[in-house]
Every structure is written in structure tokens, then in C-alpha cells.
Image (cartoon, helix red, strand yellow):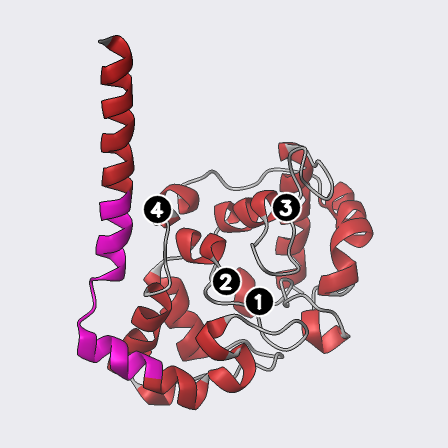
Amino acid sequence: MFAFKVMFAGLAGLAWATFSTASQAATASPSTLKLGKVLFVENCEVCHQADAIGSPGVAPSLTNQELLSISTDKFFEATIRDGREDTGMPPFAHLGRKKVRAIVAFLRFHEQKPNRAKEVDGQPDARGDPRLGQTWYNNICSTCHGVSGDGYEAGGTGTAIGSAGFLNKVTDGFIRETIKKGRSNTRMLAFQGPAGLADLTNQEIDDIIVYLRSLGKK
């Protein structure tokens, strides 16, 4: 009897997770999704590729599950609207709010996991030593993201995570989660745990975050 209750509880939890994920993907009307796809093809696909899978050294994947699960709509909308200064991502404010939101709805349509953005953004700010963070960054991150975090502009395959345009739009929890778990189907690997490229401690990750924040102020 106990085993049956455990199994039922597990199935109920799975059903809730599936419903939660599906409801997030279904919040937009078919017409909005259609408009979002058209706008994406017209404005974004040339760099981000079909279905926003990205292209190393050109533009990041916008539909990998890790990014979708920790990002708010506000993050996507602000990035599309403002672009990223000193990168190849121009601003698209001229599209207007309705069209920008339609593009975000198209990206969300690819979402398969429950959104954890509120939980991730609610994590505490990083506390650490930027000098140690710089050492870790130079040894691990700079190969892809550039010595100064300039990303593609520095010839790397990673994004410009040292730019103010990125750092002003993300929380420390967002960066922390990305370093820990990486991004599936991209070159951003996990950096914590047995399967990580480097099994960084929580403190070492916070040191890196504090160092990144210092880059955004330069």
C-alpha cells in the first residue's frame, strides 16, 4: 500500500510538472506564435539560425532548455529591445512591444521544462574575492569568452559575458546557475559536479561572478 502511494505521488508530481510546462508554452495565441515565428525569421534567424539553435562564434542558442528555464520574459524582451552594445546584437526597439513579445512567445514555444526564473533570480548576491575569480576566469572562461569577457568580438566561441549590456540584465543567480549547469547542445559546459568540466565549489563560482561584475563597471 505504501509503495502504491509513493508511486501515485510520483505520477501526480510528474503530471503537475508536465501541465506546468505545457501551460507556459500555451499562454500565447496561435496568431501570436505565428507572428513571432515570422518576425524571428525576418530579424533573428540570420544570426541565431533556425529555431534559434545558435551558431558558435556568431550568436548564442536562445532555445536551449537551460536558458529558457532560468530566463524571465522581461530578460528576453529587454535584450531584444536594447540589443548588446559592442557586440553584433543590434537593438530592435523599432519593432515595438507587441512584436517583441511575439518573438519571445515563439522562443517560449520551445520550452519543455518548468520555468525557475523567480527561484533563480531570488538567490543571494555573490560574495567573493575578485582576484581569485580572475584567476579562475582566466584559466577556465577566457578561452571562449575572451580575456575581457568580450566574447565573439575577441574571436571566442562564447558570448560577451563581461559586457555591461549583459551584466545589467542578469542576476547573480542567473550567472551562478549557468556556470553550474551549462547549456545543453552548446559549447557552454557545466562547471560543477562529477560531470563538470571543472568541479568548481560554490565559493569559487561566486568569486568568478564578483570578478565578472567588476568587468561590467569598466
**What amino acid is found at the position of numbered circle 3 in the picture?**
Ala
- Residue drawn at (67%, 43%), measured in percent from left and top? 191
Could you tell me residue 112's position as x and y percent? Answer: 36, 54
**What amino acid is found at the position of numbered circle 2 in the picture?**
Asn
Label 4 SS: helix
> In the picture provided, is 16 more to the left or to the right than 45?
left
User: Residue 57's image quarter?
Assistant: bottom right
Q: What stretch is highlighted in magenta?
A: 18-37
Which of 15 and 156 lies nearest the eye of the viewer?
15
Q: Which mark is residue 190?
A: 3
Q: Which mark is residue 168?
A: 2
**What amino acid is found at the position of numbered circle 1 in the picture?**
Ala
Q: Residue 118 carries which label?
A: 4
For label 3, count other residues whose C-alpha is less than 10 Å away and answer few (under 14), some (14-19) or many (20+): many
Q: Distance between the residues labelled 4 and 2?
A: 17 Å
Could you tell me residue 153's position as x and y percent? Answer: 71, 77
Please tell me whether mark 3 or mark 1 is closer to you in this view: 3
Counting residues from the start of the chain, the first of labels 4 and 1 encountered is: 4
Q: In this view, does 85 lie above or below 23?
A: below
Q: Can residue 187 be seen in this view?
A: yes
- Quadrant where the C terminus sits is bottom right
Q: Do the residues labelled 1 and 2 touch (CB within 8 Å)?
A: yes
In the image, residue 6 lies in the stretch drawn in magenta: no
Counting residues from the start of the chain, the first of labels 3 and 4 encountered is: 4
> In the picture provided, is 37 more to the left or to the right than 130?
left
